[in-house]
């Protein structure tokens, strides 16, 4: 091999090594971690403000407020090309998450050997001259023999939670101990938990499903649709048995709305439950959230009445507009003339329907006896006073079944349990990192002609002040006991 060839090979090796070192140095940088966290946080804020996977009109309206009517369409088109409208599935957002994971992993690997060396190093007695060089140092004097001092000091050390080793020398003894040295690994548990959470989130984004399903009252469906219109078949079906809305007082502001659902699998009923806002249903990895509702129109639905006769007998009947029925215990016959989902009255007291939603359902009833009409009026679902019929009976509108649909958000996240595992790891890691500290302690007793000189040296990885106070408290109590014993003697 010629000298030139050898130098060329060495140059390539050196160059390759320098590139690896440069990449390693970049990804082991804490500054890079700060920059990546800031970028991910900022993009997450943008992804919250700019609604993801929604109709274009919503974000165009937002951009008009931010950039004006002229720029808004162009900003929207650019944002769409960059993937801002579906940010969490974009390659660049995934790339940032991967970079952050690599950065966190390399930072941990780069610093782990040093911590491992500290933790695994055998704990040994301290040289006499080194007692004055520790972060915490104290000196006490006990009267009595070395044996008496040893008993008291051992008691104090154990009160502080240490199980000490012992080293004896010519005129004395040294006790040394450490605890919670493994708490130094806590930060790496936190790092690992972040990576676990990121992995779970990516799995959820890539392999999960977020969509919507609309179920009419009484209808059964077996598929959901993503925001992009992609169909997601389910291996079971869901029927909406009923839907109801409750309002605040006499207002049209919904207080709560609820769907009663039945789940079928292979034609058999397997689950019957209700859902409302903040109380979803889960089945086979899917979670169903109550999200919205709406009206189907006057051509749909059945009106359900609770009829109470003058003598208190009740009956529940279902009718449509145009149907008639007899009032029990009476010669009156009622006819359902008209229905309004939201009945209001104008300034001239003329009735009108102010919305298609079932905000204030009402039925106009005409009553006749034989062939002659007796009276008529509106019966409101929400106002009990309107239920009373002049002959002493009562007709209550209790439901408008089949007139509404329920809107349900559907989510399937196969990575959620990985995220939960990461959260548990993070909780444990943060607990150990913040509340536990690596502590070291050395106590040397030297026999000095009827007295015992006690020197204390200690170190705490975190919260040194609290450890110092604990040592003071325990050894001060020993001093007080010594004084009491001396006086009693």
Image (spheres, rainbow, N blue to C red):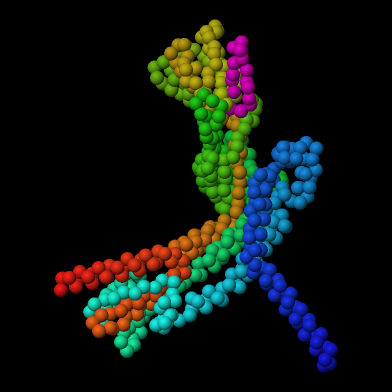
Residue 299, x across and y down, in percent:
65, 26
Q: Is residue 395 above or below residue 81?
A: above
Q: Is residue 70 above or below residue 11?
A: above
Residue 409, x across and y down, in percent:
61, 44
Residue 103, x across and y down, in percent:
64, 66
Residue 386, x across and y down, in percent:
49, 17
Towards the viewer: 66 or 367: 66
Q: Is residue 313 left or right of residue 223?
A: left
Does the magenta-highlighted stretch encompass residue 114? no
Q: Residue at x 56, y 27 (%)?
A: 252
Does the magenta-highlighted stretch encompass residue 347? yes
Q: Is residue 203 above or below residue 480?
A: above
Question: Do we see residue 287 in this rendering?
Answer: yes
**Screen quadrant of the N terminus:** bottom right
Q: Is residue 167 left or right of residue 23?
A: left
The segment highlighted magenta reads 342-358
Determine the residue located farthest toward the bottom in the rendered image.
1
User: Which quadrant holds residue 40?
Assistant: bottom right
């Amino acid at each position: 091999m010629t000298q030139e060839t050898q130098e060329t090979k060495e140059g390539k090796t050196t160059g390759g090594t320098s590139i690896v070192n440069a990449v390693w140095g970049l990804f082991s940088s804490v500054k890079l971690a700060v920059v990546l966290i800031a970028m991910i946080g900022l993009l997450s804020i943008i992804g919250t403000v700019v609604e993801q996977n929604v109709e274009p009109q919503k974000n165009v309206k937002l951009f008009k407020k931010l950039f004006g009517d002229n720029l808004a369409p162009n900003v929207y088109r650019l944002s769409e090309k960059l993937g801002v409208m579906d940010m969490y599935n974009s390659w660049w957002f995934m790339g940032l998450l991967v970079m952050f994971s690599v950065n966190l992993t390399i930072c941990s690997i780069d610093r782990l050997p040093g911590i491992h060396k500290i933790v695994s190093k055998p704990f040994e007695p301290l040289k006499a001259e080194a007692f004055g060089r520790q972060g915490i140092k104290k000196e006490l004097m006990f009267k009595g023999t070395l044996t008496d001092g040893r008993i008291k000091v051992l008691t104090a050390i154990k009160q502080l939670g240490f199980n000490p080793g012992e080293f004896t020398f010519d005129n004395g003894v040294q006790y040394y101990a450490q605890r919670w040295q493994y708490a130094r690994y806590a930060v790496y548990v936190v790092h690992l938990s972040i990576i676990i959470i990121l992995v779970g989130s990516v799995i959820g984004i890539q392999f999960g499903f977020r969509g919507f399903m609309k179920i009419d009252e009484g209808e059964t469906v077996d598929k959901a649709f993503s925001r992009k219109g992609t169909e997601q078949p389910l291996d079971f079906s869901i029927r909406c048995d009923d839907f109801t809305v409750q309002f605040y007082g006499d207002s049209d502001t919904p207080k709560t709305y609820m769907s009663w659902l039945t789940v079928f699998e292979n034609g058999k009923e397997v689950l019957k439950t209700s859902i409302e806002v903040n109380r979803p249903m889960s089945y086979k990895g899917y979670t169903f959230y109550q999200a919205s509702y709406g009206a189907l129109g006057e051509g749909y639905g059945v009106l359900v009445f609770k009829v109470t006769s003058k003598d208190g007998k009740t009956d529940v009947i279902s009718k449509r507009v145009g149907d008639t029925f007899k009032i029990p215990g009476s010669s009156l016959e009622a006819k359902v003339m008209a229905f309004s989902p939201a009945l209001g009255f104008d300034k001239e007291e003329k009735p009108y329907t102010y919305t298609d939603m079932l905000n204030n359902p009402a039925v106009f009833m005409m009553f006749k006896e034989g062939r002659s009409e007796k009276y008529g009026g509106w019966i409101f679902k929400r106002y009990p006073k309107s239920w009373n019929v002049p002959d002493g009976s009562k007709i209550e509108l209790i439901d408008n079944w089949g007139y509404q649909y329920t809107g349900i958000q559907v989510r399937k996240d196969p990575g959620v349990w990985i995220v939960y595992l990461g959260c548990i790891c993070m909780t444990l890691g943060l607990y150990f990192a913040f509340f536990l500290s690596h502590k070291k302690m050395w106590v040397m007793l030297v026999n000095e002609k009827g007295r015992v000189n006690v020197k204390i040296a200690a170190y705490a990885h975190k919260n040194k002040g609290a450890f110092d106070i604990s040592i003071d408290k325990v050894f001060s109590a020993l001093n007080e006991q010594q004084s009491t014993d001396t006086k009693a003697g």
